[in-house]
Image (tube, grey):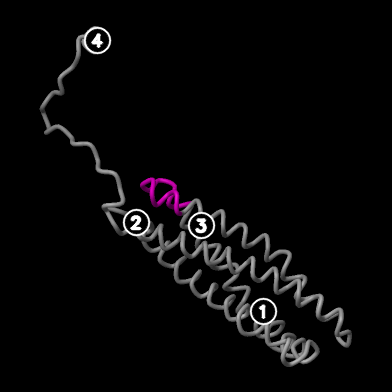
Amino acid sequence: MPTRQAIWLPLAAVVANGLLVGASLDQSIKQLPARRRIGVTAFAAYSQDADLRNGIPWYATLGLGAPALTLAAAAVGRHQPPAQRRALVLAAGLSVGHLLVTAVAAPVNFSQRTHTGDPAALARVFDTFERLTAVRTVLQAATLAAMVWALAAAINPSSRPPEPPRPPPGLRTPTTGADREATH
């Protein structure tokens, strides 16, 4: 029977990663492409008022919280059955990848503040940020998939190898001649 942590931590990581993927897809599919319709200067004003103000605590909580839960689940899961352990190791690696790309993407997005009034520079900032966001979104979605796999492995006993049968108490197991000689 799996421990509570073997189920609850992956479940929490699935929820957090799901929210993170949703936020990233919103930005990739809806927000960043809008700059081509409304203009880069108007988009920068929106982004600075939304993403770089109220959005900072939201994105920081999701962007750091989901990987923290994923890494915690992987740490706790190191003693779990092989299928769950493999999924957790994969999710942890993908989370680290997401964090590394975010370490590049966040400063790029913040750099728009220094280019206010320069549409060409803002366009370069948002083009770069859009590419990095696409990479992050793929890593986040893959992390979510790996965490769902880990959760399924924790919940589904058929994904675990069967334990070998144990002899009843008091029953001696047969030994070979080599075993007897080693004990004498």
What amino acid is found at the position of numbered circle 4 in the picture? Ala
Q: Say whether marks 2 and 1 touch (CB < 8 Å).
A: no
Earlier-in-chain disc, 3 versus 4 = 3
Q: CA distance from mark 3 to mark 4?
A: 46 Å
Q: Which residue is mark 3?
A: 91
Quadrant position of the C terminus in the picture? top left
Q: Say whether marks 4 and 1 touch (CB < 8 Å).
A: no
Q: CA distance from mark 2 to mark 4?
A: 40 Å
Q: Say whether marks 2 and 3 touch (CB < 8 Å).
A: no
Where 181 sits versus 61, above or below?
Answer: above
Q: Is residue 133 magenta?
A: no
Across and down, in percent, residue 153 comes to 35, 55
Q: Nearer the viewer, mark 3 or mark 1?
A: 3
The disc placed on residue 178 is 4
What amino acid is found at the position of numbered circle 2 in the picture? Ala
Where 100 sits versus 161, above or below?
Answer: below
Q: Which residue is mark 2?
A: 154
What amino acid is found at the position of numbered circle 3 in the picture? Ala
